[in-house]
Image (tube, rainbow, N blue to C red):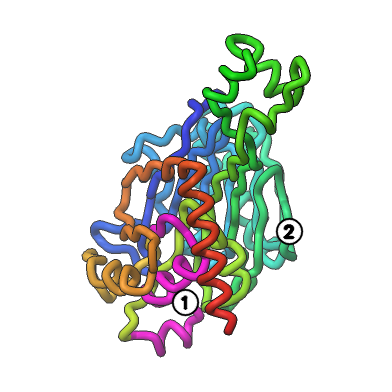
Amino acid sequence: MVLQSMRELVILGTASQVPTRARNHNGYLLRWDGEGLLFDPGEGTQRQMIHAGVPATHITRICLTHVHGDHCYGLPGVLSRLALDGVRHPVHLHYPAAGEDVVRALVSISSPGIDLRLHPHGKAGIIADGLEVRPLKHRIDTFGYRLVEPDGRTLLPDRLAAAGIAGPDVGRLQREGTLNGVNLEAVSIHRPGQRFAFVMDTAPCAGAEELADGADLLVAESTFSDDDAGLAQQYRHLTAGQAGELASHAGARALVLTHFSSRYGDDATMLAAQASARAGAAAVMAASDLQHIPFPQRRSPRADLAHQAVHHLTRQGGRQ
């Protein structure tokens, strides 16, 4: 199994508990270089993958935030499809340890034949290379996910030229860190790694803030309108405005809203407007089923430094 080196989010479903004609239950496939991470496969995910052009062979990890049906009942179908398609690479399944019985039951009715590796987690921390979780605040144990690329260095052509380094020597310098007395730091600048955050089914909480912090792309539930804040509080969900605030306080670059209540029909324009009003500099998008969302391009080094300074001042102001 080989994935192209690319990063994009494929939206397989955007409904909450009740699907609609235009919105399937949850499902999100993140293509991240050589990995394919499937988040919260609800009912119908296997069919949505066909419509979205997502081969089952692209899935390397499946991440469940919690075991409510609209976030996991599509798991047996997806696993069975992996078996049918003869997937030979290991598939890692991450889920809250409190949902062990439900996950085991869903796995037991799937077709056998794949190398499925179960990874329950019960606390905040790193659960795989670059992948970490934080507890959220829902009616059952729920965890959000965060994927972080290691920081790197951006080479500066003018400094390379001044140092007389070109061709294959550039790669050698990157691998070894020094070449002919020239250090990598002298011909490059710091490049922060990109970050993806997945925040689903939660009331506002510290875990959501930690996941979203500095995210280039933040996927957040937006189950209720601000006008229904009482319902959101009762069922421990976010309103659209709260999702916008989460993105703003975290300094996120882009916010993708999803998990919409069927009470608002299939038009999420109102929810997007409410989130945008409180999202600060974050670009806001209401997700649609089968949408392919490219990962934001990297910031220029100067733009990133300016962003960090503004974000720091904003967070400091919020603490006063």
Residue beneath label 1, please? 237
- The type of residue carrying mark 2 is Gly
Residue 146 is situated, as x and y percent measured from the top left of the image, at: 59, 54
Q: Is residue 261 above or below residue 235?
A: above
Q: Is residue 90 left or right of residue 41?
A: right
Report crowding for label 2: few under 14, some 14 to 19, many 20 or more residues within 10 A (C-alpha): few
Asked whether 141 or 274 is in front, the reply is: 274
The disc, 1 or 2, on the residue closer to the chain's N-terminal end is 2
Q: CA distance from mark 1 to mark 2?
A: 23 Å
Residue 16 is situated, as x and y percent measured from the top left of the image, at: 39, 67
- Count up the numbered dots: 2
Residue 144 is situated, as x and y percent measured from the top left of the image, at: 59, 62
In the rendered image, is residue 222 in sight?
yes
Q: State the mark number for residue 125.
A: 2
Q: Which residues are magenta?
A: 228-256
Report crowding for label 1: few under 14, some 14 to 19, many 20 or more residues within 10 A (C-alpha): many
The residue lying at 57 percent from left, 62 percent from top is: 213
- SS for dot 2: strand
